[in-house]
Amino acid sequence: MGAIHPESGIERKIVKAACPHDCPDTCGMHISVENGVAVKVEGAKDMPFTQGTLCTKVARYLDRTYSKERVLHPLKRVGAKGEGRFERISWDEALTTIAAKFKEIAAVDPQAILPCSYAGTMGLVQYASMDRRFFHKLGATLLDRTLCSSAGKGGMKITLGAGVGMDPERFDEARLILIWGTNPIVANLHLWSRVLEAKRRGAKVIAIDPYRSLSAAKCDQHLAPLPGTDAALALGMMHVIVNEGLYDADYVERYTLGFAQLRERVQDYPPEKVAAICGLAAGDIVALAREYAGTRPAAIRLNYGMQRHSGGGMAVRTICCLPALTGHWRDAAGGALLSTADWYSLNHTVLERADLIPNKPRTINQSALGDALTAADPPVRAIYVYNNNPVAVCPDSQKVIAGFRREDLFAVVHEIFLTDTTDYADIVLPATTQLEHYDVHKSYGHLYMLANTPAIAPVGEAKPNSEVFRLLAARMGFTEVCFKDTDEDICRQALSSSNPRMAGIEWEDLKAQGWQRLKVPARFAPFAEGNFPTPSGKCEFWSQTAKDMGLDPLPAYTPPRESALSAPQLAKQYPLAFISPPARNFLNSSFANLAFAIKEAGEPCLDIHPADAAPRSIGDGDPVRIYNKRGSFIVKARVSDRVRTGVVAAPSVWWKKLSPDGRNANEVTSQAIADMGGAATYYDCLVEVERAPAG
């Protein structure tokens, strides 16, 4: 409710909101509004997990909502594809054009139409509801959304049964924390505050990461394995734990499956062998294993960076075995955390309405979008992009661009800004920001549902995804009642669950408070007595599920496709392992066009170790060209020991049009997929680096 100040006559109100971005924290927000204008964005101090703190990006959210660079009206292309030249049109013309084109294509084969969305917003209304209904009813090609996390989710499901883990709120009570393949200062700020509190209380914090990130630099110890070797490290730890009798025999006996087979498997991974694979000292592996097994409670925070290689799913599957082997699941502050997403039980069936599909459409893997747009049979004739900037973020960029450049591809992009992808659009539609629409949010990094209430009217002629798909459904003649659902109807539908963890979470109450915790104990130790959501009810060291998928039923090490050990001939040409971790000031490609974020980020750069820079005559600040057979891009070198020898890192994702040579890190990444989930393998990549001509 608003209140009018008696002297100024200004109506002031506070609106409860939720951060929509692809981050595990899903912060509660309060938006201060004066006479219909948002004047302040701050963290919701009463939200127990995020406690009033926002990251530096979202704290500046008004810069995004009120940016002069926003798309405010529908546009149609007037130049060549890639030029980004448009003229203003009406919503009526835009919708009529899109519907006519979709009808024309669908009359021949609706599979020639491809939705192309990802996690630009994570709310259930704007991410996965009316859009899914629309494309399902149309019979369009299905999109397998695989860019970020699907390998890790697959690995977690094999070992634990679902995307579940320990309660992040308990990390401050742990005595040992392994920060494994993650940089929480950048990607999980509110967990990091709990890690620091644990450290203040005497806990030891160890980072495992090829890159000395901001977080790794603040840990008590940093181990830097070669990219893609995490599973080997976990198996080496298990070798020590098993052979030295450091495992929890009682927990293993009661609550795990396949220990005898695991005992045999880990004999193949003695510390000396693992050290050679990982590029670590054998003594460090032994010490890590003993410390992990001997400290209670001990928590592992792993994240999605360490599963972006060919064996990424198996790596997560293997690491997730460690807490069961040692019995760390007995403690609320022990265990492992990759995602909390499957602790929620939302009604995706009614949200997405797959029952509307009239045919048996194919599925296209987003990680291989370049191949899909250039070589799919039948060809993709129309693409509708929303919540996504595929020209910037999809691997093997030149193939993606070749697809978008096709004159016979009708491309619609619904966006807030004129991105790298809108430059190739035939129609651009103006999108709302989080301050301008309803949504309901779960998290993959805590145990709270959140509501988002619009704080202001849409800026310009912007419309939310849900509204555009309602309008298009009417133009297409879709008569099902579900296409008339309002956004608040969809919020209620999302929460309509019989799962006891969702008990008491109703839309009106959630909207009023802003957040509600799932109905789980305050000291949530989900697997203290087993009860894993696996087929056996146990943590599965040996997995029939994996075997049925054609995978090794036991934890294993799958080497990267591109590494000195697995591809020695390729490594002679391209000897450096390339990773592109998130830049602190961006969120994937979101915020990467805003002046404050660019100023703080500086310019695109490549971190390279002095031992790798010297033989290439590369000095700090030199322009360098990073290249392989897929492509190349130019940035400035930062010569330091942030990365280990043999590894280079380009913090990402920069927009191409804002980069020195109009290219970014995805020029060199591959469309090859991981062992599970059809996932992208951004960090399974060999390159060479050379000095580039100045200027």
Image: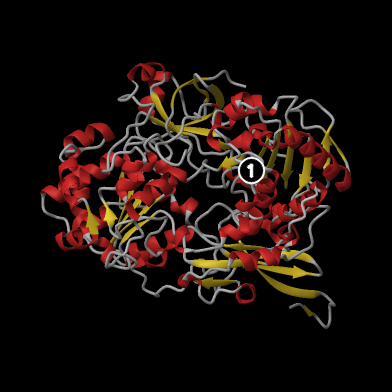
Q: What SS does tag 1 mark?
A: loop
How many numbered discs sit on the rendered protein?
A: 1
Question: What residue is drawn where x is 56% and y is 25%?
Answer: 633
The image shows residue 70 at horizontal and vertical percentages of 76, 47
> Looking at the picture, does residue 297 appear above or below residue 648?
below
Residue 396 sits in quarter: top right
Residue visible at 83% across and 45% down in the picture:
95
Three-letter code, disc 1: Asn
Any part of residue 661 in sight: no
Q: Quadrant for residue 3, please give it.
A: bottom right
Q: Nearer the viewer, residue 623 or 145?
A: 145
Q: Is residue 1 left or right of residue 628?
A: right
Classify residue 35 by image quadrant.
bottom right
* Residue in the foreground of this view, choosing between 18 and 426: 426
Q: Position of residue 676 (x, y in %)?
A: 41, 40
Residue 264 on image: x %, y %: 15, 42
The picture places residue 175, in percent across and down from the top left corner, at 27, 63
691 left or right of 595?
A: left
What residue is drawn where x is 70% and y is 44%?
A: 138
Quadrant into which the N terminus falls = bottom right
Along the horizontal axis of the image, is 92 left or right of 496?
A: right
- Which residue is outermost to the bottom? 6
> Residue farthest to the left?
244
Quarter of the image with the C terminus is: top right
Query: Which residue position is annotated with label 1?
Result: 388
211 shown above or below 375: below
Q: Circle 1: is it few (<14), some (14-19), or many (20+) Cα within 10 Å? A: many
User: Is residue 324 at least partly visible in the picture?
Assistant: yes
Lateral position of residue 28 relative to residue 273, left or right: right
